[in-house]
Amino acid sequence: MNVCLIEPSKFVSLTNFVSTISMPPIGLAYIAAAIREEGHNVTVVDGPGSAPRSYHMFKDEVRVRGLTQDQIIENIPSDTQIIGLGCMFTSHWVYVRELVSKIRERFPKAHLLMGGEHVTGFPEFSLEQAPLDTVVMGEGEETIIELLEHVEKNLPLDNVSGLAYKNLKGRIRVNPRRQRIKNIDSIIQPAWDLFDIKKYNEVNQPHGSSQGKFMPMLATRGCPFSCTFCTSPNMWTTEWIPRDHKLVVDEMQEYQNLYDATDFQFEDLTAIVRRDWIIDFCDEIINRKMEVTFQLPSGTRSEGIDFEVAEKLKKAGCHEFSFAPESGDPRVLKEIKKKVNLPSLYDSARSALKAGINVGCFFIIGFPEDDYRSVLKTYAAMVKCAWVGFTNVNLNAYSPQPNTESFKMLQKMGVITEFDDKYLMSLFTFQDFGAKKTSYNSRFGDWELSLMVNFGAFLFYVIYFLRKPYRIIQLFSDLKSSSSSNKSTKMAKSFFKDAFTIVKNKMIKA
């Protein structure tokens, strides 16, 4: 069958540093490879990657990076039979929903499907709001292949695990979830040849700090923990499965040869869970005498990192990783099921910093369980991070992601009663320092929460620079360089790059 996969263009805000990340979509690349392996014809329309320096407004409300919706549709081959889209973030649903409707108008007979964390959390809602035929829930490689076989042979979909769909009567049916893939080493490597990797490296705004030509990687899948605010338990279950470390290193070497990659951005949910695995992985890189750097920007666990492991990581090329304690209050940590021991985390950070690895941290303010005392404890934790020597902190407002335990609690309490566009868009602003947050905590108003988040970030960076004033020089030096000393300077560079491009584009249009 002729299949077209689409990565929709993304919302971007100069003060939402996560939105300024420009990374090849590894999930879509894995799905493309699985489909092609089964003998289907696959094309890809990469909205953000095809035009990473193009911006347009969506409904005069939010800026979008990438191809316009009409440009995306123009790039879909006319003989396409299956059109699949990804939607990871619920905050992008208002944009993707409109794109799906336009695609349906242009391709009325095509089978439209969608995967990703949004539809996994909101399958019925997604099928009700957009003219989709099916949505793939959770891990998609096996489900998509079985779905294509059933569509091609016009078979009923009621026995395809991991699928939600509209039947012939237009009624929505949600099938049982599919079991996770146990042998993840059998999953074919991402089809990166369908994407413009060179263009992503020209933009040079990866997830972690920029250390050269980069490639996204996955060494593990899943996370063994059940944090109440996280979508991972619903998307991936709580099973953590590592790949064979030798095969991971083989893939890195392959990307060195194909794309001249020197830096690898591991997008794992929780990369370091088993101490023995990370040591074996590092030893494999060291024994092969590979000259590479790698980052773990999405967050990892502190329990497996002592000075011995940190030295090994540094020798293998690890440049930076992040911890994710989320709160500085043990009471809140217990209530959100975040299994973190803060004193141990600081000890692990000191070991990593001593070994020469940059360390970042993720915090959240505004959990339903938060009060003023817990916010002060989180501020204290951030101050300690700055004093210890952490090189960046990512402080966000709490956002209730679909079908998480925390989201369901807010529904039960009557705090969330409908999923209108206001709610959907609030999930984008929670990471935006320049926008008013939406508070889902009865103790804090919207503006109060916004000020608390901005003050926390200000507090960290004041101490960050006062503690080590040379970082000011380092920041200005990095602005002129193609690389970044750490994630903080990378975020600053992304801000100025995007701001310059937006102003330049406006002047050209004028």
Image (cartoon, rainbow, N blue to C red):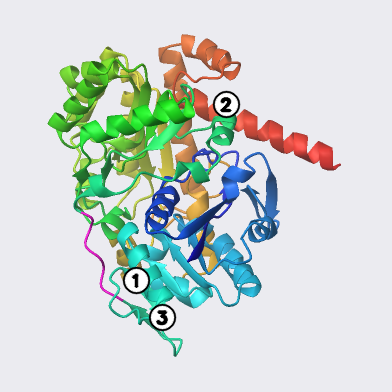
Marker disc for residue 163: 1
- The residue positioned 48% from the left and 45% from the top of the image is 431
> Can residue 350 be seen?
no
> In which quadrant of the rendered image does the C terminus lie?
top right
Q: Position of residue 146 (x, y in %)?
A: 33, 68
Q: Earlier in the sequence, mark 3 or mark 1?
A: 3
Give the image quarter of residue 311: top left
Up the image or down, 50 lies above or below 310; here it is below
- Residue at numbered disc 3: 154
Residue at screen point 61% across, 60% down: 76
210, 74: nearer the viewer: 74
Q: What's the CA distance linking mark 2 and mark 1?
A: 41 Å
Left or right, 470 with reference to 100: left
Mark 2 or mark 1, which is nearer to you?
Answer: 1
Amino acid bearing label 1: Leu
Q: Can residue 271 be found in the magenta stretch? A: no
| Extreme residue toward the front, this view | 39
Query: How far across and down, in percent of the image, does residue 362 sit?
Result: 36, 37
Secondary element under disc 2, as helix, strand or loop, is helix
- How many numbered discs sit on the rendered protein? 3
The single residue placed furthest to the left in the displayed view is 276
Amino acid type, callout 2 = Lys
Residue at mark 3 to residue at mark 1: CA–CA distance:
16 Å
Point out the stretch of residues depicted in magenta: 175-181
Return the residue nearer the eye: 321 or 374: 321
Q: Residue at x 19, y 48 (%)?
A: 224
Q: Mark 2 sits on what residue?
A: 493
Q: Is residue 482 visible?
A: yes
Disc nearer the start of the sequence (2/3): 3
**Compared with residue 25, is residue 440 higher up or lower down, i.e. above or below?**
below
The residue under the point 20% across, 53% down is 238
